[in-house]
Structure formats: C-alpha cells, structure tokens
Image: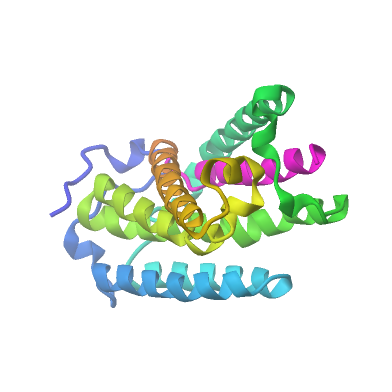
Amino acid sequence: MPSRDPQPAASRPDGTAGVPSRSRWRGPLGTWPAVALTVGVLAVANVLLHRWSGPVELVTAVAVTAVLLAVLRWAGGTRADAGLAPGTLGRGARWALALIGLVGVVYLAGALLPATRGLFEDRRYAGMDGAEVALRVLVYVPVGTVLLEETAFRGVLYGLVARARGTVWATTVSSLLFGLWHVLPSLHLSTAKPALTTVFGDSALGAGVAIAAAVLFTAAAGVLFCELRRRSGSLLAPMGLHWAVNALGYVVGFLLR
C-alpha cells in the first residue's frame, strides 16, 4: 500500500492532497494494465516515428501524447500525477529556465575548448541550412521529441508507477524504458558522429556496443530527469533540460561544421 503524505493539502504548492489511498486511485482501468497499455502504445509509436518524418512525425507525436494522457486519466490519474498541476507550473518554469541557461554555458565552454570541440561534430549536420536547424530547434525538438518523451516517461509512466510502488520504482521503470526507447534512434550513431567512430569503429560489433552505450546513457539521463520532476513537482523542469540538451546541441553542431 502506498504511504500517505502527512503534509496537508493547503501547504502543498499545487494545492492538492498527498498520495491518495488505493481506493481513491482506482479507475475504470487498473494501474498495471494502464502501464502495460502505455508501454504498448510507446512500442508502436517508436517504430512509426523511426520510419516517418516531417509533419506526419509531429502529428503522430501529438496524437500519442494525447492518447497517453487519456490512459492516465482512464486509470484514475490527475494532472498532478502527470506533473502538470497548475500550482507547480510556475516553479517548473523557473527550474526549466535555469537549466537551459546552465546547458548553454556548458555547451559554449565545450565549443570553445579545442579538447572538447570535436564532441559536437556530427555528419548529419552537413546538408542542413539555417532554416532547417531553426525548424528542428523550435518545432521538431520541443514537439516531436520533448513533449512526447517527457509526457510518456516522466509524466504518465512515472505517475502510474509512483502511485502503486513509490518514486524509486517509478524512476527505475521509467528510466529503463527510456533507455530502451533509444535503441532505434541509435542504430547509426557510431558512424554519424566522428568522435564515436573513433571509439567504437565502424564494424557491426562497434555499432552494437555504441547502441548499448546509448541505452545506458539515456537510462542514466532518465534518472536525472525523474529527479528533476520529483524535486520541482513539475514536468516543465525535465522538459527544459531535455530541450536544451537536444536543441542547443543542434545549434552548436551546426555552427561548428
């Protein structure tokens, strides 16, 4: 049974009560069937998004996000369970802005230092122009990547599992699945980035090791994102960091071509 939060509703930043009892958490769909349904939807979406690009990709990402939030609601979840309680959005936005600034400073230092500049090189930027980079930074990263992934892994999955098993289980399940989510996007990672080709080579074995490393790295990043969600009480905090890491990486990589 999940423990009750002794903190009264009036003292919580979102104005909501603590973790409800199991009887209040029941919905038309049970918690674990909801988790299984969420994972199934994400598995199908992962394959489709790996094959599709352009506006279809964006529409799919938004549609899947809506479906996952509907699953959470069907299981009896609330906006607070997804990290979207109105009372936490201001705090989450402040966290997001601070994290974006921090990533910007780190990336700037990395781009200026000769020892780390090569980490930003990526052959996928060779054919891009400024307009395409801007489209990725302002549309595809926030909508096609951040919105879907944060809602799915730090919102719906985290909220469902946290209610049933607590934050440690929620962080573990969410982060492991987040790592596995990146298997398909990592298939050609070792050949796209020269710095990784130097480490892993361009053989099938090297590609496999690079994929395994990407899964482990993104799973570890998922732990960090979950902790940001827990500490801030808002999904906006991991969203801000996620956007900054991806979008500012595009900008720096493009400028260093």
Location of residue 64 with respect to 147 vertically, above or below? below
Give yes or no for residue 234 being in the magenta stretch: yes
> Quadrant of residue 257 in the image?
top right
The stretch in magenta equals 233-257
Instruction: Give the camera-side residue of 156 and 126.
Output: 126
The residue at 40%/72% (across/down) is 71
State the image coordinates of residue 238 (x, y, percent, origin top left).
51, 44
The residue at 82%/54% (across/down) is 128
Query: In the rendered view, does 170 fall on the left or right side of 255?
Result: left
State the image coordinates of residue 49 (x, y, percent, origin top left).
58, 71
The residue at 45%/43% (across/down) is 221
> Quadrant of residue 159 in the image?
bottom left
Tell me the quarter of the image containing the N terminus.
Answer: bottom left
> Quadrant of residue 101 in the image?
top right
Query: In the rendered view, does 237 fall on the left or right side of 73?
Result: right
Location of residue 20 with respect to 62 vertically, above or below? above
State the image coordinates of residue 174 (x, y, percent, origin top left).
36, 54
State the image coordinates of residue 79 (x, y, percent, origin top left).
43, 57
User: What main secondary structure does the magenta stretch of the protein show?
Assistant: helix
Give yes or no for residue 229 being in the magenta stretch: no
Instruction: Give the camera-side residue of 3 and 175.
Output: 175
Q: Is residue 109 visible?
A: no
